Amino acid sequence: SILELRLYQGFWLPEHWVPGTIVFQRRFAPRPDDVILASYPKCGTTWLKALAFATAARTAYPPASAGHPLRRLNPHDCVPFIDDIFATGEDAKLDALPSPRLMNTHLPYALLPAPVVTGCRVAYVCRDPKDMVVSLWHFLRRAKPDLSFADTFESVCDGTVAAGPVWDHVLSYWRASVACPDRALFLWYEDLLHDPAGNVRRLAEFMGCPFSAAEDVAAVVDLCSFDEMKALEVNRPGSGTAGRYRVMPRDAFFRKGVAGDWANHMTPEMAARLDEIFREKIRGTGLAFP
Ligand code: A3P
């Protein structure tokens, strides 16, 4: 594997995720209006955080306003990683968040504490695994410059990757969204690219703050668009760190922001192999990759 991993309740967690996960599982007390944003890493977490934050806060902060928090802060500084907060013993930060609280996690649905499953809502964003692998490699390379694409690809294929196997991660949320659509929403990165306004409307409805017909969804979409966010001073190279344990440079969360970049990194044989692995794993579940 490319990281030090521990098999924890059926999933491969990076060693440094384990303490926060355990405390999260034991101590998290949901509020009924909490919305947990969930994702497999590199599938659109940052974008989903920005969209959900801009949507939930749109009365307090009109999206077009120059002083909007998302113009001053990286989305990871607006919506905290729950398990990181528990890892650093900063539970009070979660208590202090105003309702409705927005938080996020990369843990699979099966590892969320039972009160989340019954007590609040979870919105998940999924992405073509081929583009996820490419994005993951570029991201990990920021910390490990000699990491090869081939090794990253192999660890995704054999399941031994952070929070993997990826297919089990995806399926855990897919099944939750089928079983309980008002508690678990399943979104696609590719759908967000194709129809951002329609998907933001779905997200808002799910979060309990639907847009009225007269309201301007486009302003939220524009504020959170890749070009806007990448160009912000706060997300430029050298602007500091964000994300898990605040170790990654903020600009590492904005690379290309497109679908299909896999074609520039893998052979058709590799693509077919990864597609086949996923096809096999999701067969009969009703889930279909775009
Ligand atoms: P690429 O590396 O393919 O460009 P995460 O936020 O889960 O870490 O995922 C990061 C991926 O989402 C990166 O993909 C990044 O460029 C892309 N991304 C970040 N912000 C985005 C936005 N506002 N719109 C579209 N894609 C975005």
Image: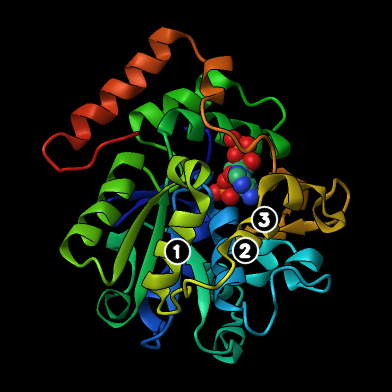
Disc 2 packing (10 Å; few <14; some 14–19; many ≥20)? many
Left or right: 31 in relation to 218: left
Q: In percent of the image, x 53 and y 33: which residue is there?
A: 2
User: Of the residues shown, which amino acid type is indicated by label 1?
Assistant: Arg
Q: Residue at x 41, y 14 (%)?
A: 270
Q: Which residue is mark 2?
A: 220
Q: Amino acid at mark 3?
A: Asp
Q: Position of residue 258 (x, y in %)?
A: 58, 34
- Spatial CA span between label 2 and label 3: 5 Å
Crowding around mark 3 (Cα neighbors within 10 Å: few <14, some 14 to 19, many 20+) is some
Q: Earlier in the sequence, mark 3 or mark 1?
A: 1
- Report the amino acid beneath label 2: Val
Q: Horizontal and vertical percent for residue 96?
A: 60, 91
Report which residue position mark 3 lands on. Answer: 222
Label 2 to label 1: alpha-carbon separation: 10 Å
Q: Which residue is mark 1?
A: 201
* Mark 1 element type: helix
Q: Nearer the viewer, residue 105 or 66?
A: 66
Along the viewing direction, whichever of 60 and 289 lies nearer the viewer: 60
Q: CA distance from mark 3 to mark 1?
A: 14 Å
Secondary structure under tag 3 reads: helix
In x, y percent, where is residue 281?
21, 34
